[in-house]
Image (spheres, helix red, strand yellow):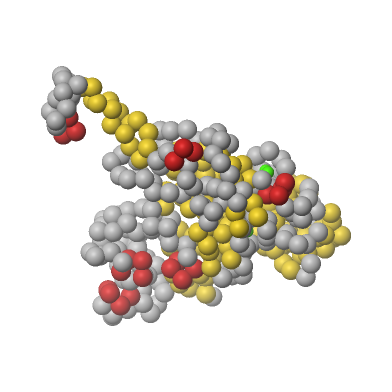
Amino acid sequence: MEAIFRHGLFNASSLNISIRPISLSVALLVVCNIAECNQRSGVKSGTANTVTKTEDDSPVIVGSQKAPQDVLPESMLKSRTIGMNIFGNALFENRNGKFQDISDKTGTETFWPWGHSVADLNADGFQDIFVTASMNYPFRYHHNSLLLNDRGERFQASEFTLGVEPRRDLRTATPWFNLDCAKADSSHKLCEGCSGPVTVWAALGTRSVAIFDLDGDGDLDIVSNDFNSLPMVLVSDLSTKNGNLNYLKLRLEGTRSNRDGLGARVQLFAGGQTFTQVQDGQSGYLSQSSLPLYFGLGETKVVDRIEIDWPGGLVQIVRGPLDTNRELAVVEQESSP
Ligand SMILES: [Ca+2]
Ligand SMILES: [Ca+2]
Ligand SMILES: [Ca+2]
């Protein structure tokens, strides 16, 4: 299956994407943060698999008598000085109520994240991740990441093969502020060696990203919010390139619980497989995607059954066969049948 993202605002040349699969069979939690020594949110223990946090956010190791170098995640050990690195993503696997960091072995460490949005960008039934990155002035540019889920086993960094990077015209920076080195700003450190007006540039940086079907053609598109710069609109051509695209959008309408069914757990049964999603608002950091749940179905064309566990406690069953490639609205029942 192939798909391509086109920079809608920038007319960047499209790149063919070899889209690989994504979806995880167990509950997973992705945590992104960016921090230096006194801002980290915790480290895991080597034996107790416990994540903790101190009041001043300094790192702490729980449940282990091992030396730090024996218990810190692999990604932290790549720094020469512990505590002076950027602490990137952490992907925690829920193992019967205890979480284990699997970010390195699953390929989810991107080293400079701001936030992430999760959706099935190639509609293969496995959830993919878009991770925003970069820090603007005075830091260097860092690319955004698109991690394609390789059938729940690991993620493949695909931002360059899918056309997300590089940006239009290879842009990595933008004018940030001006200095008058002849007068008011003459003592500024950046005026050294300069005697006239100076424009200081900064690296571009993406903060948030929303994923939804922007043009209503059945594939998921991406819109980013870039700090002090234009947004990026990444338009997918999956629906035109893949004549076998199969998906179902599910819009929940709550009655007894809440209007949009936030908190509902949905299981979709199709082709002998079970697809599970939670109506969590479909949101990344500082962004809000559209609410219909988007189920990529891979090769499956008919849905056999949908089970919705509404937050009010009612379990509702929608019996099939149900046609795909459309939006289906389900209204919460007033009571169990
Ligand atoms: Ca996918
Ligand atoms: Ca679309
Ligand atoms: Ca499209």
Give x and y (percent) for residue 74: 36, 70
Q: Residue furthest top?
A: 183
| Depicted 301 relative to depicted 46: above or below | above
| Quadrant showing the C terminus | bottom right
Rendered residue at 40%/77% (across/down): 48
145 horizontally vs 253: left or right: left
Residue 198: percent from the left, percent from the top?
Answer: 24, 26
Identify the residue at image location x=35%, y=40%.
Answer: 203
Residue ranking furthest to the right: 321
User: Quadrant location of ligand 2?
Assistant: top right
Front one among 286 and 15: 15
Which image quadrant is residue 22 in? bottom right
* Left or right for 150, reference 207: right
Q: Quadrant of residue 300?
A: bottom right
Above or below — where is 134 with respect to 32? above
Measured as percent of width and height from the top left, residue 66 is found at 28, 80
Residue 313 in the image: x percent, y percent?
A: 69, 59
Q: Nearer the viewer, residue 2 or 114?
A: 2
Would residue 55 be seen by someone viewing this image from the given angle?
no
Which quadrant would the N terminus be assigned to in this image?
A: bottom right
Kindly tell me whether residue 163 is visible in this rendering. yes
Q: Please state which of residues 195 and 73 is positioned toward the viewer in this rendering.
A: 195
Image side of residue 332 versus residue 20, left or right: right
Q: Quadrant of residue 183?
A: top left
Could you tell me which residue is drawn at 28 percent across and 41 percent down? 138
Viewer-nearest residue: 286 or 123: 123
Residue drawn at x 28%, y 64% is 79
